[in-house]
Amino acid sequence: MSGSSSRNIFATLVNNAIAAIMLAGPMLLAAAGVAALLVIVGAGPQWPWFVWVIAAPVIYLFWVILYLAICASSTRRMGQRYPKPRRFAVRPGHGLSPESLGFRTAVMCHLRWAVVERLPFARATGRIPCLSTLWMRAYSPMVRLGSGVVNFGFIVDPDLTEIGDNALIGGASVLVAHTAVAREDGALVFTSAPIKIGHRVTLGGGTTVSLGCVIEDDAVLEPCSVVAPFTRIPAGEVWGGHPASFLRKRIGLSRSGHDSRAAV
């Protein structure tokens, strides 16, 4: 076995170990915290069965909140120290440059996003006012949401996505500010670019907004539309289709930027 092959195998093992620790570590720490709490309150076989039935959902919710908090702390630290790169070509043995560590931040955030979005009640913690963005901070170094935002979609990169006040993101909509493309030479090229959503923007259900897009104030994107990368949608316009294109001006829009009628 050549020296380069040995180094590649070692690098793969290290990367796999780091990924396992980053994913499983917070879960184990949260479980230890829950166990410590149960010991403090004197939980044990002496509790009647109906007490355990009542306590079980509360214990699970406490574990979820603690898990999200631990993830949020580590994600913020890693994101601040090694921010996601704007462009990085991943090759075997690329070393530990700041860009490569930033790429690892991006990978970690994406893996945690996949876990958090499938974790029962993780997203529901957003209904608690003091924890409204905790579930997004668990997989993003930063959250940039305005006031009054209604979000039923999936914001994959909250740190690269700025959303204005009173915006509405429809169900199953996806906002993703990065992409990865395999080149002919075998390298994987990671690219990211911020998304900006203006005030009072409406994204219909099932829409997709790609990296680098700018949707200005009071614009509307019709359901199931796909906005191509680096597209700019001017204020007060209605777009739709795949790829999305201009359809019409938004009707009933007053000078203050609010609809004077309910219709769109």
Image (cartoon, rainbow, N blue to C red):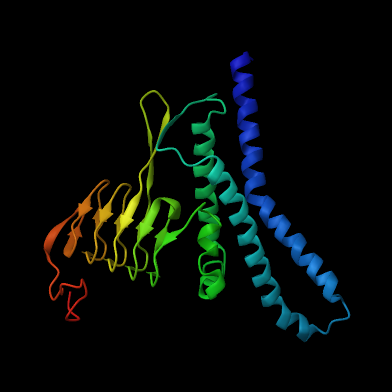
Between 16 and 35, the one nearer to me in the picture: 35
Q: Residue at x 58, y 44 (%)?
A: 78
Work out which quarter of the rendered image holds the N terminus and state it.
top right
Q: Is residue 114 left or right of residue 10?
A: left
Instruction: Name the image quarter holding residue 201.
Output: bottom left
Q: Position of residue 20 (x, y in %)?
A: 65, 45
Residue 30 in view, yes or no: yes
Q: Is residue 234 left or right of residue 164?
A: left
Which residue is situated farthest in the right direction here? 46
Q: Is residue 25 above or below residue 200?
A: above
Q: Position of residue 72 (x, y in %)?
A: 59, 56
Q: Residue at x 41, y 50 (%)?
A: 160
Q: Is residue 38 left or right of residue 160?
A: right
Q: Position of residue 98 (x, y in %)?
A: 52, 32
Which residue is situated farthest in the front direction here? 256
Q: Position of residue 91 (x, y in %)?
A: 48, 26
- Count numbered badges in the picture: 0
Q: Is residue 180 above or below residue 170?
A: above
Residue 156 in view, yes or no: no
Q: Residue at x 28, y 69 (%)?
A: 200
Between 57 and 128, the one nearer to me in the picture: 128
Q: Is residue 31 left or right of residue 4?
A: right
Instruction: Name the image quarter holding residue 62.
Output: bottom right
Q: Is residue 149 above or below residue 75?
A: below
Which residue is situated farthest in the top direction here? 2
Work out which quarter of the rendered image holds the C terminus and state it.
bottom left
